[in-house]
Amino acid sequence: MALPTLDPNAPEFTRRYPNLADPRLGAVATFATDEFFAPKDRMLNPEPAVFIPGKYDDHGKWMDGWETRRRRNGGYDHCIVKLARSGVVKGVDIDTSHFTGNFPPAASIEAAYLPDGEPTDATQWTEIVPSTTLQGNSHAYVAVSNPGAFTHLRVNIFPDGGIARLRVYGQPQVDWKGADRIKLFDLAAMENGAYVVEANNEHFGPASRMLMPGRGENMGDGWETRRRREPGNDWCILQLGAAGTIEKIEVDTAHFKGNYPDRCSIQAAFVEGGTDQSVITQSMFWPVLLPEQKLSMDAIHSFAEQIAKLGPVTHVRLNIIPDGGVSRLRLWGKVKK
């Protein structure tokens, strides 16, 4: 599987939050007014869009994305996407890679909260991305400020054309009120609302990939820093999906063989208020949750007895020493009462 390479020009929300439109998490394109040239499902493919010269199908040139026919009767096309999780959208990437003479001149996105069903003609939509000018073969990154949680999006393209990929970056919303206080939850899982506050380096892979479900598919499916040529170590700060007491930790170096960290440690704290920048500064002085541990290549490292009894925490700082790659991080804990 070819995972997207990091775009140095991409905004921070693309590295901090998960893609709520990822089909691997359960997102699905449920309806499109037209998909004559290319089906709507391709627009959500987590792999980068490709262009294959000379490849045609029964409808014309094969394109890797969602593409509608040329409209001759007015109006515009749209597609409905059911997000993998109800969540607050922080930003989107409308990607027209390889669409040059057939991209939409503009697009907008509306959202709705429908936890128990699908949209109907009576659905009230809220605009979260106003009509935005698109360019061919490029990314349109748009930050979203609406604080509401949504389950469905309506992607409008004016008047027709093709979108290669749609990424919807946001924070999943989880109702912890009725959660079993005895059960262990992975509080670092993106589906449980965890997200990356900051990482000092993400040269080969964003830290957010550590929070994905399952094991990494290859060496590109994880957090990997550049080779450190100066003293110190690399680190990543996470906000947990809920405050909780950590009782089990898993650090997975799947597929990292010549580039896994030599050691790791974890600090943690219960943080109330403050800004992300203040959290970054404070994290250097947080108490140790997991003392420095030796790591090995391509393996799941489980820790329980080594974990300090700090009580409920909201944030953790994973230190990798001195650098390298981690595929997945699991922090199993009991949700705070």
Image: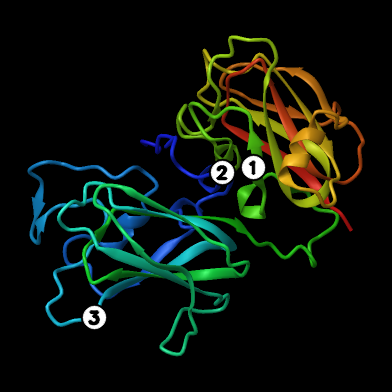
Q: Nearer the viewer, mark 1 or mark 3?
A: 3
Query: Which disc is residue 75 wearing?
Result: 3
* Residue at x 20% of width, y 67% of height: 68
Compared across the picture, whether 279 is left or right of 192 comes to right
Q: Nearer the viewer, mark 1 or mark 2?
A: 1
Q: Earlier in the sequence, mark 1 or mark 2?
A: 1
Q: On the image, which quarter does residue 179 sit in?
A: bottom right
Compared across the picture, whether 144 is left or right of 239 comes to left
Q: Amino acid at mark 3?
A: Gly
Query: Which disc is residue 196 wearing?
Result: 1
Q: CB of mark 1 within 8 Å of CB of mark 2?
A: no
Percent position of residue 38, x then y: 21, 60
* Residue at x 72% of width, y 65% of height: 175
Q: Amino acid at mark 2?
A: Met
Q: Amino acid at mark 1?
A: Val
| Other-residue count near label 2 (Cα within 10 Å), few / some / many at <14 / 14–19 / ≥20 | many
The correct choice, above or below, for 288 with respect to 29 in the image is: above
Compared across the picture, whether 134 is left or right of 305 comes to left
Instruction: Using the image as rendered, state which of residue 303 and residue 319 is in the foreground.
Output: 319
* Residue at x 34% of width, y 66% of height: 107
The correct choice, above or below, for 224 with respect to 43 in the image is: above
Instruction: Using the image as rendered, state which of residue 43 and residue 246 is in the foreground.
Output: 43
Q: Earlier in the sequence, mark 1 or mark 3?
A: 3
State which quarter of the image contains the N terminus.
Answer: top left
Residue reaching furthest to the bottom: 122
Spatial separation of the CA atoms under disc 3 and disc 2: 39 Å
Residue that mark 2 sits on = 212
